[in-house]
Every structure is written in C-alpha cells, then in structure tokens.
Amino acid sequence: MMIDDEELRDVFKVASEEHLQNLDDGLLHLENHPDDLAVLEALMREAHSLKGDANMLGVKDVGTLAHQIEHILTQLKQQENPASSLGNDPTDSPYERLAHAIAAIRKLVHEAVTGEPARVDTFSVLAELMGAPPAKREDNPTQEPEVNSIEVINTVKNNTFDKNQELKENATIQNPKSKIVRLSEAEVQNPKSPTNSYRIETIRVGTRHLDTLMTQAGELTVTKIRIAHRLGEIEAIANLWEEWNRDLFTNRFAFSREQQGDVAHQRLETFHHHSEKRLEQLGHLVKTLQSSLSEDTTRLEQLSSDLEEGIRTLRLLPFATIFNLFPRMVRDLAQQQGKLVELILEGKDTLADKRLLEEMKDPLMHILRNAIDHGIEPPQERERLGKPTTATIRLKAYQTPTNIVLEISDDGRGLDLDRIKQIAVKRGICGEEELAAMTPSQIQALIFAPGFSTAPLVTEISGRGVGLDVVQTNVEKLKGTIQVESFPGLGCTLRVNLSITLATAHVLIVQVNEMPYAIPVEFVQTACLIKSEEIFPLEGRDTIIRDSQPISIVQLADLLELPPMPSGLTQETALSCIILQVGQAQLGVVVDALVDEQDILIKPQSQLLKRVRNVSGATILGTGDVCMVLNPQDLVKSARSRSQSISSTQTRQLAPTKPTVLLVEDSIATRTQEKRILETAGYQVITAVDGLDGFNKLRSHAVDAVVSDVQMPNLDGFGLTAKIRQYQEYSELPIILVTSLASDEDKRRGAEAGANAYIIKGSFNQEALLSTLKRLV
C-alpha cells in the first residue's frame, strides 16, 4: 500500500532508512559481540520507533514485522547468555532471521513510498522470524489473506498485548514541515510540561534546490570576473583622461604666449577654461567610480567566495553515508565465496559533496566485490602461505588541501604482472615492444584498459580488472585519477584522488589557432619552453627529456584535429609546452601561447553532445568568449592512439564488419529473443537447437564467439564447452554460458569446462550479454 500524502512519504522514507540502517549495523555488531546489552537496547528502540512510524501512517506490514523484531530482541536481552542462542548453524541464528526480516521491510518501505509492488509474503517472513515453518494458506492461494498480524503473533507466542499501552507508547505529533517528534507518556498527559518545549532542530532541503544554488554561485564567480574586466576598462579611461588633460594644459600654455593681446585669444582662453572644468569633473567622476568599483569588486569577490563555500558546506555529507552500505555486502559475499574477510572502515567522518558520494558508490562496490572474488585467497591457501585465515580489506577516506583521497587495500595475492602482459598482448591493448619499455606501475595500470580481464570466468562477481575501465570512467567524470600499487603475495592498493570542488574548476587558458582552450590545473605538472633541437624521435613519437625521463610531445592542434594555420616559427623559436600528468602517464602538449589562469564554471555538454572526445565541457570567459574545457585523460589516449595509427594500418588487415556469434539454445522463445538482441547490436548470428547441433555448425563455420544454454538435449552446455576446448584451434574462442542454473557448483563446473563467462537468466538483461561479448570478442 502506498502512502497517500507526498510529504509524509518523504518523511517516512528518510526516517525508515535511518532506522533500518541502524538495525543492520547493530545486528552485524551483535553477531561478534552478542553480550553487548547497550546495543541490544538501542536496536529495540530503533525497532519500536519504526513500528510507531509505520502504524501511524497505515503501513501495517512494516509495523507488524518491526513489532516482531522488537519482540525477538527483547527475548535476546532477557536471556542470561545471548551467545547461546546462536547454536552451531550460523545460517539459522536469530540474527540471520532478523537480517532477512530487515531486507523484507526495506522492500515494503519502497512499496509504501513508490507504490511499486514489493512481492513480500509477510506471513512467511513472520513464520521465519518465529522459527516456525510458514502456515499453509487456504481458499484462493493468489489472494493475500487479511490477517491481523498482531493477533497472529499473540496467538503463537501466547503474549498479551495492551492496545492502550501501545497507543501511549506510540503517541506522536507530526509536523509535516519538519520531523516527527515523539512524546513520552508523561508529556502526553501533561502537554505543558517544561520538557515539552517545541524546537525545530533541523531543516531538510531538497538537493535539487542546493544544486540550483550551487550553479548560481558559479555564475556569480563568472560575473565577478566580468566586473574585473570592466574595472580594467575604467582604468584605461582614467589613463586616457590624464593624457588628454596633460596635453591640453601644455598646448594652452604654449598658445597663450604666442597669441597675447589677440581677441581670438580671449575666446580660446574661455573655451580652454570650460574644457578644463569639464575635464576636472570627468576626472573626479572617473576616479570616484574607479574607487567605488574597486571596493565593490573586492566585496563581491568575498561574498561570492563565502556563498559558494556555504552552499558547498550544505552539500557535504560524511563518507559513512555510503561506507555503511558495504559491511553487509562484504560479509554476505565472503560467506558465499567460502572466505573469511574483515572490512575495516576509516575516515567515515570525512566530508564530501553529495554528487561525489553518489558517483563513487558503485565503483567502490565493484572494487570491493572484485577484491573478495579475485584478490583474497581461500582460508586454506592463506594458512598454507603463513597468512591469517581472515583476510583484511581496508577502505579509507581522507582529505588533503586539494583532494579527497580514497584507498582500498587488501592483503590478498596481489596482481600478476606476467599475466597482465599476456592479457594485454592477447586483447591488443599494447604490443610486446611497448610492454618492454613500461615500468611495473605502468603495467599495473593496464588493468584499467577497456576489455581487460585476468579472470578465467566472468560471472556476476567478476575478477579484479573486469569493468575497472568503467570505474576509471566514473572517476574521470569527477575530475579525478586512480592509481594501483601491488606487491605479489602481499596485496593490492587502489588509490583514488578526487577533486574537492565539482561546480567550478581552476584552469589554465591556452591559445591554439587564435582560439582559447582551458585545461584543468590539477593535471598540469609544469609549463616550459622547448627548442626544436631538443626534440628527437623515439618509437615513432616526438620526444623530449625532462628530469632524465623521456616524455612524448604532440601539437594540441593535431590532437584536436584543427586545420593547419600559417606559422611564423623558425628553428630558433621556442615552443610553449605544457606537461600533463594523468596517473602514471605524462604527455607534452605544444600550444601557441599561455593566456591566463582562472576559476571557471564548467557548462556540461547537452544531450545531443553527451560525450565528445577530448572535451569535458565549455565555459564563458570574462571577455565573453566561449572556451572549450579539454579532458586531459582523453588527450593522453588520443596521443597514444595517434602514434600507433601508422604502424597499426601497416600490420593489420581490415576486420570483418560483423563478428559472427554461434547461438546454441533449445528454447525457441529464448533463442528468438537472444538472436534479435545480437543482430540489433551488429553481430551475425548462427543458431543451433542443442549442443550437438551447435558443435557441428561450429566445425563448418568460422565464428568469433559462442553463446550457449546449459540444459539442452543430446549435449548440454557443459559438455559442449568441454568438447570445444579439446581442439587447439578453439582454445581462445570466447564461450558464454547463459543459464538458469545459479549455484556455485554450476559456476565451478562452467569454469572447469572452459567457459569465459557465466550469465544467470534470472538476472539476464541485454546489457550484460552485450557488454560481456564486447569485452571478450
């Protein structure tokens, strides 16, 4: 049931999320410290508050489950030894049942807030909470029974329930403009009690309003720069007035000595006198305006800085906002993988912009999942290596004067450099000669290349490296960089550096072909002048030496594919060069001139130009000129691909316009759907009705990948995969299994048979299939 009032929906959404998060965190704590009565009592209060909110707003199922959670917590508190209730089976502990109930409540809250059906069987969840099998339903099984859940609980547990007392405990006053204020029984009976003074402690503001204010504060910064330009123009007028006044005085003095006694002299004297008075008045006005405008500009600069800082502070949230989502995920995933993992969170109080938290939640989750699946060894292997059987993953956030830094480190097996080199050559990311010239840190950074993966089997839990190009893309959107440090056998650390400010940027304005371009300063290592004799070729690229390190250089006009312009440069002319530093990569960019360094407001690209290579946005300078803001990461990639284009065209033949996929599926409906998806994505599809038919067609056709079901007649997907791998010519052929078999044993069988990816039909979507194919083919 959806709550009718929109404002009440918002209040309930925020309040219930807080209660559920506190319950989840507390249960995780009690699993390791079951005798902590203070936490138990805090959880009882959270459950009671959630029950009161839900009952007041008519969300009966949430109130019912919250009441039963409170009842179980009360029982745990009354036990002399709460740890004894855990038993030998951790999957049947009361904390596990409570966790399942909390997950069900989250779905019911989502239904109450959005109206989307939760598909939660409250009766079954109640039965599980009470440790009893679900009762059988009678009559129409498709109809949800109308059950007074409180009566059911009381019948099963033989508890008495004082409704009057419950009403007293849950007596509330709701102010839809602020928050729900709970009153004690004494305050209900005596509303004039001194403790009943009403105060609004906090005000909740929609984030969209803060976004608008932040944009306007950025516009104010641009206006401040424009006013500074106007001030410069007034100074030019003042200088012109001083020259005019000086020339007038000089000419008048010389003319008066030559024309003494003449009648015309008197008239000219009068004219000069009036002109002097007018010039004096003009000078006074200009100087007054100049002084006032200078003061106003200083004041405006201070106000705009304070306003921008104030709004930015309003948007700041602690990293605990997203960090609190990870302990449960790590615990469940480690348990699923049969591994022991302890997650240590540091810097939860570090503040960051809400957009930064939103954009970094999924990348951090992806990094943690990959660390558990591919980085952490099983307990037996760790014991054999002399490591603690419980692995440690440390997630740390801290702030420097210019950046927000996130570090994700583990004490697992680390990165295998030899394996990374093999995959890089196999995927065509770089050649063997290029690898030979790379440092270990540059080789490690290859895991962020699109399509890179060292995992033998791609599942919903991918190996480290799968999808890290997506992580890097999200980091680059936030004007950040990501670095990797790994020590074989000791562990791996990913370090993400993010910009503190997102709405405005400090940039270096350069000029190319008489047009201004902006480059974010945080990626500029230095600017220098180079002479033509300092440039020498190295591996097909123009190179210079700086700090004993070779750095490739390129004309910015060439990277941006601008038309050539006549140049007056000679052999003796020094070139303006900017050294960009993007992660471990360096690139020298030659420009026509360095113009200025200033703060700008980046205008995002429209939906028509959602992603333009080498460009991250645009801005309007104080002069009124439109200026493109360049993307340093793209510039480095463009320079790398440009240097390889000549050699690649000489060594590679044209690839087929349509890669061929063999689709093996016995269900005609599924086969038709998948065939349509693949053909729409640009693949040529050959279909087969079972494993044996698929193998025969594979022997008679050249294909680039195989997509197969598992449960099929004649020859199933596991057998087909194993049979294909028996032939040397198919050892590198990508094989993707799409099946409804979701157990760990089935995934293990797929990996042992030689499959490259395992996609569950229950969570199947075309993006998963197409992205996996793009990665493997």
Image (cartoon, helix red, strand yellow):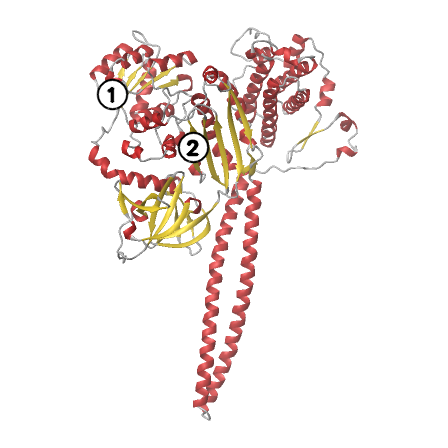
Residue 352's spot in the image, x, y percent?
53, 38
**Left-right relation of 428 to 459:** left
Q: Residue 313 carries which label?
A: none
The amino acid sitting under disc 1 is Val
Check disc 1 and report its element: helix, strand or loop: loop
Q: Name the residue under label 2.
A: 484
Q: Decide which of 707, 380 is in the foreground and name it.
A: 380
Residue in the picture at 46% in, 52% down: 598
> Which of 318/241 is in front?
318
Judge whether 111 appears above or below 88 on screen. Answer: below
Q: Quadrant of residue 9?
A: top right
Q: What residue type is labelled 2?
A: Val
Q: Which is more foreground, mark 2 or mark 1? A: 2
Q: Residue at x 56, y 9 (%)?
A: 89
Residue 703 badge: 1
> The N terminus is located in which quarter?
top right
- Image x and y of residue 512, in percent: 33, 52
Question: In this rendering, is residue 764 above or below 130?
Answer: below
